[in-house]
Structures are given as structure tokens and as C-alpha cells.
Image (cartoon, grey):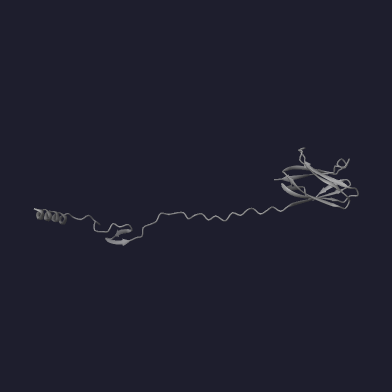
Amino acid sequence: MRRALTLAVAAAVLLVPAAPGAGAAKHRGHKRYRDQAVYMPARKPYRKPPAHRPPVTPPAPRPLTRMQVVAREFSLTLSRQSVAAGTVAVELNNRGEDPHDLRVEPADGAPLGFGFALTKPGELTTQKLDVGPGTWKLYCTLDGHAALGMSATVTVTG
């Protein structure tokens, strides 16, 4: 009986028609093309390459801003009318015949301010000042000098 069963199964397999392409290997990367197995490499999913980022470099230090104030009887002349906020080197150049000093403070009356010592005729005095944005007034603090014209304003941007 076993032999008869084996023969019946074998006959059934031989009599059933095969499906088209049933004999082709179903391996990844293989396709049938005009009844021939043709190898086509499997496609890898697209992966965006990592973004190239340049190395981070700290910003270059800003050069020191300089401003000269020339004092004469009775005027103050500024080398520039505006400066950038930050550290500013202010030079008081006394070209007058009398000694003069200089006061630098915000025009809005804030208590912050900088003072230069009395400078003799022909001398220079320099100070590095940290100034913020806004309008700053400069004037000689000696009695009556500011009223006679020894005052000026500078605009600080930034």
C-alpha cells in the first residue's frame, strides 16, 4: 500500500502543470527577464551623507577703537563722531595754553562716567573706557570751560 501511495503522489506531481517562472530561483537580487535568470544587485536604501560642517572657530577679536579729543581754548574737537560699543581708547590731547581735563558720561544723566586728570598744555593722556550704546557727552570740568564751548557729544553704536 505504501508503494501505491508513493506512485499516486508522483503521478499527481507530474500531471499538474507548473506555474510560469516556478522553476526560477527566488533569491534576492535575481529577476526573470525573457525566461532567463538575470542577476541584478539589490538596491540599498538611500542614506543622506552626513553634513560637512566646517570647524567652529571663535570670532577674531575686534580691534581697539581709538578716538582723539583735542582740547583748545575753548573747544573740544573729536577725531570721530561715532564709535562702536565696547572698549574705546580715548586720547586727550591738550593743544591749548591752559591745563584742561575731560569728563565722559552718558548724555541721559546715568551715574556712570569716566574722568581724565588735569592735562598740561602740550601733553597727552590716554584711557581705555568701556562704553555702551547711546549718546555720550564729553566736557572740561574746569570752572566755566564747558559753558565757553569745551563740550562735545559722541554716538556709541551697537
- On screen, 119 above or below 38? above
Image location (x, y in percent) of residue 139:
83, 43
Q: Residue 107: which quarter of the image?
A: top right
User: Can you give x and y, in whole percent of width and height, for residue 106 in the image?
Assistant: 76, 41
Residue 37's x, y, as percent?
29, 61
* Above/below status of 19 relative to 100: below
Q: Quadrant of residue 12?
A: bottom left
Q: Tag count in the figure? A: 0
For residue 12, side relative to residue 85 (left or right) = left
User: Left of 146 or right of it: where is 110?
Assistant: left
Question: Residue lying furthest right in this view?
Answer: 97
State the residue at coordinates (75%, 44%): 155
Q: Nearer the viewer, residue 156 or 118?
A: 118
Q: Locate the C terminus and report the quarter of the image it occupies.
A: top right
User: Is 26 situated left or right of 90 in this image?
Assistant: left
Measured from the top left, where is residue 145 in percent x and y?
A: 88, 42
